Amino acid sequence: MSADVSRRDLLNTAARGTVLAVLGGGAGFLVTKANGQIVWQVDAARCINSRVGETGVPACNLCTTECVVALSAVRAVNDHARCGRCNMCPAYFKITSPVDSHGYPSEKLCPRDAILRRPIGRMDPEDPANNFYEYLIDEAKCDGCGKCVMQCKDPLGLGSITLRVRYDICKNCNRCAISTACPRNAVLELPRDQAI
Amino acid sequence: MKGKGWQFLACALLLLPWVRILPAQTVPYQRPVETAPQPDSIGGGYRIPVVQKPLPRAYWLQILDVALLAAAMGVSIWLVLARRSRKWLVGLSIASLAYFGFYREGCICPIGSIQNVTVALIDPKYSIPIVVTATFILPLVAALFFGRAFCGGVCALGAIQELVVIRPVQVPRRLDRALGLLKYVYLGLAIAYAVKPALIRNFLICRFDPFVGIFRRTGPPHMLIIGGLFLAAGMFVGRPYCRWLCPYGGLLAWCTRLARRGVTITPGPELDCGLCIDACPYGAIEKMRAVGRNCLYCARCYDSCPKHRQLVRIS
């Protein structure tokens, strides 16, 4: 009986050692090829909304509809260094809407009213059209629908607004649902240190 | 004549809004600038705001997550094997559910890491961070020595089901065994889909995770419905996902067969009253003895034992 038990113990220990060795070997192999984390990001050069030359098509809103997060992890981001700060921003105003009494289009483009507009720099008290304006995107409201991105790009604007994955919101899914749906393969994996 | 006049008036009234809108002018738009104005031309001391770039979760925090996972398993082993305390184990389950489930939103997940580990082993272009490897390995190593400590009180998917078990029925053993084979089918499918070429690769375990939608409080409707159904069923059938579907549970069960220590029902014919069998909602006690590979570390058997206090002396 005791010999039997000790024999089973021995076999057990041997088997456990083998499994541990296999696990350790596998882990060791994975550690040697491990790199940093991978993150998802939108490639602005591929995204329909920001790709120069694709005008006159409706803005693609798959980033809004496909993301597993309720308010998509993809948000519009205005690169202020490239923004024209135009008086009449085609991404802020819906330029096809009727003109109002102040000479501006009467409707805003953003369906969620997420773009804030304020005059900056030297003020021209006579003519507000002569001022520069800063356009800030309220990320808590933006859902990444891409309408402003589509309007901001050349030839209407300077293309300062692009769609970007916000890493603090992104769940970093193994298989990003947006990347699966994106018709241009514009949502790509990047190493963490190259994150935009 | 009079009627016709009214008709004209009605038509005119109906057309009035259109009359106002149709000739309305839009702005003759033309891009006013060709380059972005710089601070000196903007003037007024304007500075270009920095574009915020939120970073992914800091690396040391990810290491902390893994350390917490290991610590929680240690606590689970101690609570169940040494303290034999069901009460404290429920406490640990709540804590794990709060942290790994609702705070980390179910994404420090050894279950899902099966896929990443498999792909990283097979695809030379795919690699995973060390923390993911550790997340995968640690519960298996714990199982090799102590059984499925990860399942009890640590795994968020397990904890959420553990806490809804209110009136469990005993599932017939044959049915239980047959359903238990499903997890190996699921494991096989998950691996088969994960090892496909990168573009058509699919992560089934993540896509059909029943509870991640609940942890995130948002998600596709099918996910939330499946999660709700699992929880509803889990009130009467103990932890259905863990026992019959969890692919990682399959791996843990294999490792547990070699475990040196685990939950044991102290042998002794005069003590074999069978109360623990009725108390175990997971069918993990057979012929009065605990079956490690099915034991989910819930400590209900100890809790149900009248002699429990006298039996706690563990060498």
Image (cartoon, helix red, strand yellow):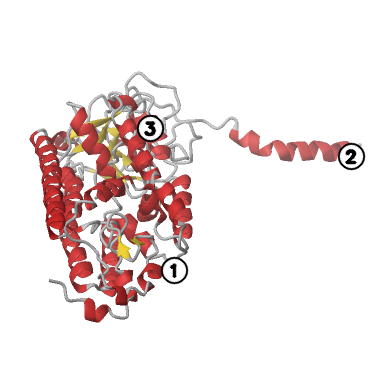
Please indicate whether residue A191 sits to the left or right of residue A187 in the image: left
Image quadrant for the N terminus of chain B? top right
Label 2, label 3: how far apart the Cα atoms are: 49 Å
Q: Amino acid at mark 2?
A: Gly
Q: Amino acid at mark 3?
A: Pro
Q: Secondary structure at mark 1?
A: loop
Q: Residue at x 23, y 68 (%)?
A: B80
Q: Chain of mark 3?
A: A
Residue B304: % across, % down: 34, 75
Q: Secondary structure at mark 2?
A: helix
Image height of B305 relative to A19, above or below: below
Residue B147: % across, % down: 22, 57
Q: Amino acid at mark 1?
A: Ile
The residue pinned by badge 2 equals B3
Image height of A114 relative to B98, above or below: above
The residue pinned by badge 1 equals B166
